Amino acid sequence: MSRAGNFAAAPVWLRFHSHSLAKHVNDSRDSSPLIRSGTAILLIRHGETLWNRWGRVQGWQDSPLTEVGLAQAHALAARLAGDRVERLVSSDLGRARQTAEPIVHRTGLAIELDPELRERNYGIFEGRTYGEIEREDPEAYAFLTRRDPTYVIPGGESGEAFSARVLRALERIAGTHAGHRIAVMTHGGVLGVLYRHATRAAPDSQRDYSLANASVNHVWFGGGSWVIERWGDVAHLPRGAADDPVD
């Protein structure tokens, strides 16, 4: 159930410090101490799944990769094999692990599973399309579409709790692997949390960034700051990727 067409994968150069938006960075050769001492993270969304194709909310449930998703996973592995990646950390959900497996075969890296990298727990909405949710639970649907970060999905978690979990996990991973170049296999919602945090976008604002399946999103962390270097990179994929928020 895509709400928007594909967004351009043009580089986005933004530096964010914990309390204020800092200057725009317009040169990848920036040699500031933050860049040199930070952790390079390739933040990756899993390949296309059956429920992505059918527009069903997955959350903590799972569906297998489609033939397109499998091809995306192999193209991603070929890309990362030449990208000097030193560690591979993944959500423990099946679709993320399935996307990461070809990377293991191409690079010899072991997968380090981290449950805190899971998608948002969508509780009673999981396995359903947004159309079904709107028809069957109009009141709950209204709360969901208002993007209220404090709304706790019945049987699931609030956007506020989800964001806190994701940022805690990513900062812990970056700190544990300081000075390394690591790949993090995760989900669309996780990518969205990091992007909004780094750019100071309001949690209830309209999405204006890509969440493409099997996209590589280049970020740095160091000194308490996140840097988005390049977002929505799908140059390794044979025919792009679906920019679908349903995950």
Image: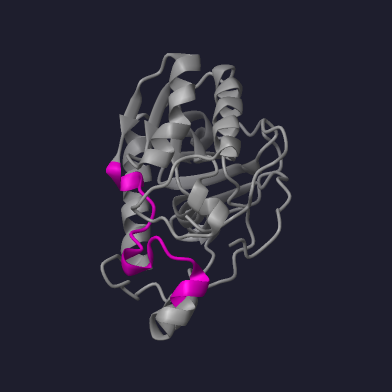
**Relative to the observer, which residue lies in front, 126 or 195?**
126
Q: Quadrant of the N terminus?
A: bottom right
Q: Give the camera-side residue of 132 and 107.
A: 132
State the residue at coordinates (70%, 53%). 6
Figure colour scheme: one colour
Viewer-nearest residue: 173 or 78: 78
Q: Is residue 141 above or below residue 196?
A: below
Q: Name the residue furthest left.
A: 155
In the image: residue 212, left or right of residue 104:
right
Please give the count of numbered marks on the rendered protein: 0
Q: What residue is at 66 percent from the left and 47 percent from the top?
A: 12
Magenta stretch in the rendered image = 115-133
Confirm whether residue 147 shows in the render: no
Q: Residue furthest bottom?
A: 139
In the rendered image, residue 165, in percent from the top left (x then y), is placed at 31, 54
Q: Position of residue 130 (x, y in %)?
A: 50, 70
x and y, in percent, of residue 213 in the image: 57, 44
Q: Residue at x 38, y 56 (%)?
A: 59
The answer to whether residue 6 is magenta is no
Q: Residue at x 54, y 40 (%)?
A: 66
Residue 116 falls inside the magenta stretch: yes
User: In the picture shown, does residue 29 fall above or below 164?
Assistant: above
Residue 169 can be seen, yes or no: yes
Image side of residue 100 versus residue 11, left or right: left
- Against 113, is 23 above or below? below
As drawn, 147 above or below 81: below
Residue 158, given in percent of the width and then of the height, sits at: 33, 68
Displayed quadrant of residue 54: bottom right
